Image (tube, rainbow, N blue to C red):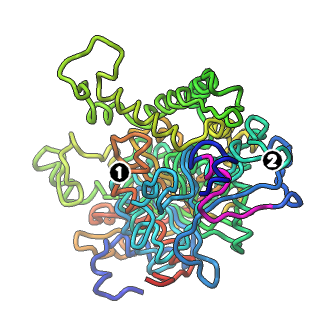
Amino acid sequence: MLAPNSLRQHRVDHLLIAQMVAHGSRVLDVGCGDGALLQLLADTKQVDGRGIEVSRERVNACVARGLSVIQGDADRDLDDYPDGAFDYAILSLTIQATRHPKTVLEHLLRIGRRAIVSFPNFGHWRVRSQLLLTGRMPVNEHLPDAWYVSPNAHLCTIKDFVDLCRVVDARVERAVAFNSWGRQLGTWIPLTAHNMLGEKAVFMLARK
Amino acid sequence: MNTVDQREFPGDARVLEANRPSSKYIDIPASQALRLDCDQLLGPFRIAYETYGELNAAKSNAILVAHALTGDQYVASVNPVTGKSGWWETMIGPGKPIDTNRFFVICANILGGCMGSTGPASIRPETGKAWGLDFPVITIGDMVDAQVRLIDHLGIDELFSVIGGSMGGMQVLEWASRYKERVFTAVPIAAAAWHSSQNIAFHEVGRQAVMADPDWCKGRYLEQGKEPRNGLAVARMAAHITYLSEEALHRKFGRNLQDRATKTFSFNADFQVESYLRHQGSTFVDRFDANSYLYITRAMDYFDLAAEHGDVLANAFKGTRTRFCVVSFTSDWLYPTRESREIVQALNAVAANVSFVEIESDKGHDAFLLDEPELFATVSGFLNAAAAKRGLSPVTGTR
């Protein structure tokens, strides 16, 4: 395990994912960015990790630090992978930026024995109130860009995502929402409350 | 070089090198002849090679560098024919991305080459004359099979890495396909799994230029004390354009005139770019054998790793445990990124461990030989991580 100090530098959803993933498993991180999650999983769980990232600069930085990453994107390149190639196919804060979230999710469930998806919750009370009170697309820490430059093409709420899981026949094995302070919401509170109070959510899914 | 040698091998240091390499070499006896892809047996044959750094006790730190079409074994040391420094000294040496303080680097002249490994310029034992066109047509796979004999000779079971650019990358892919269990990591750079129609077309122009030169003498020029200098120079000039990019040519030469203020209204080399190409052509002829050029370009044309595996490239890598790092360059139109991506797709289809980096450069195909910091960062990062997995200590050998 890493020292508590270095853990503090990690994103809360990454830390949660690192808890979910089994030791020594095979992991594909789709939209792996600068490789922070892959590095965390390699350091704490000794996973056999691979990444896909659209930005050439970030890919090159990942490979230069020794991570197995290819330049590609979720919409185009998941097709190449065989069924069940990985124990976990992870999509962390990326699904909202894909062109075809449903197809991408189906691929994740096909490629990985489990899929782990995290996303910003558009149903969070602050997002709702911004839209309600200002009448404009919300801009905040987690949705930092104006609508016309934002890479986010398909924003959804936690409830919307639960619906999608039903559509693609995925079983929700675990669902966790984080509030604005990065704390996990209690599992006992109802879905509607999660959808209101959760700023980010992490789902672990499996094929039915 | 003594006078007897000069009478025996008329010509220059190059012809001598083809038969008496200054580098290390091994001679494989006829009893261990190589079964070529064309089904002929080749033996005895010689593989000339150089090594850098030290092989560790476990023999686990060896990196084979595969050279490109006109390369040679002098990857990080002075070429005895040209007197120039090694062709990849930016990449290989102490403290370089392929660090010879840590790795034992092997580079062999390819089969069919003209720097000491058996090829058309070598003396054929049966006849006492150069092989010329009697040399069998070889393939990239044959080159790799010949290298395997060298690696066996060095007592190495598993190469830590096979690395190469362009045709070197083709050899890397063939190694990773034919000898999966002997390749821990593979780094094909600016390469492709098959030679495109356009690439075959350019090679054919080069070969026709050589063969149209009367001094080619139907391939028997060495016996007649001649050389198809003009033909080979034209072949090199045409090929050299394909190694660059329009942008790089324009930046370097534009429409600038060479050592003159105005056009001469003649067919002299008025433009700098013409002068540059003529220079490239003539220096190439001084160091390369024309028949070798024919054979090696042919081997590249024949290369199609998918065709060798039922037209499914992924089959070439089925069951691989090798870690791959595929590299392409944005301005390389000879082996474009698209073709590297096909390799990556095939590797993904068998869930292989693969990294893929496209490096932004305007220098065209030749970028892999040039000072490209991102290439160096990629190669060293990839190798260091793999070395940790392989349990290699950070630095072996002596400083």
Circle 2 packing at 10 Å, graded few (<14), some (14-19), many (20+), is some
Circle 1 packing at 10 Å, graded few (<14), some (14-19), many (20+), is some
Q: Residue furthest top?
A: B265
Residue B104 image-quadrant placement:
bottom right
| Numbered mark located on residue B36 in the image | 2
Q: Disc 2 to disc 1, how far (Cα)?
A: 43 Å
Residue A110 in percent (x, y) is at: 60, 54
What residue is shown at x 34% (from left), y 51% (from top)?
Answer: A156
Asked if the stretch drawn in magenta spans residue B258, the answer is: no
Q: Residue furthest right?
A: B31
Q: Is residue A63 left or right of residue B318?
A: left
Query: In terms of depth relative to the viewer, which is nearer, B42 or A57?
Result: B42
Q: Which image quarter holds the C terminus of chain B?
A: bottom left
Task: Write down the chain letter for disc 1.
Answer: A
What residue is shown at x 75% (from left), y 43% (from top)?
Answer: B308
Give the amino acid at mark 2: Leu
What residue is shown at x 28% (from left), y 55% (from top)?
Answer: A123
Asked if the stretch drawn in magenta spans residue B22, the answer is: yes
Span colored in magenta = B15-28
Helix, strand or loop at label 1? It is loop
Q: Residue furthest left?
A: A134
Q: Which image quarter holds the N terminus of chain B?
A: bottom right
Q: Is residue B291 left or right of residue B288?
A: right
Query: In terms of depth relative to the viewer, which is nearer, B72 or B105?
Result: B72
Give the amino acid at mark 1: Ser
Residue indicated by mark 1: A55
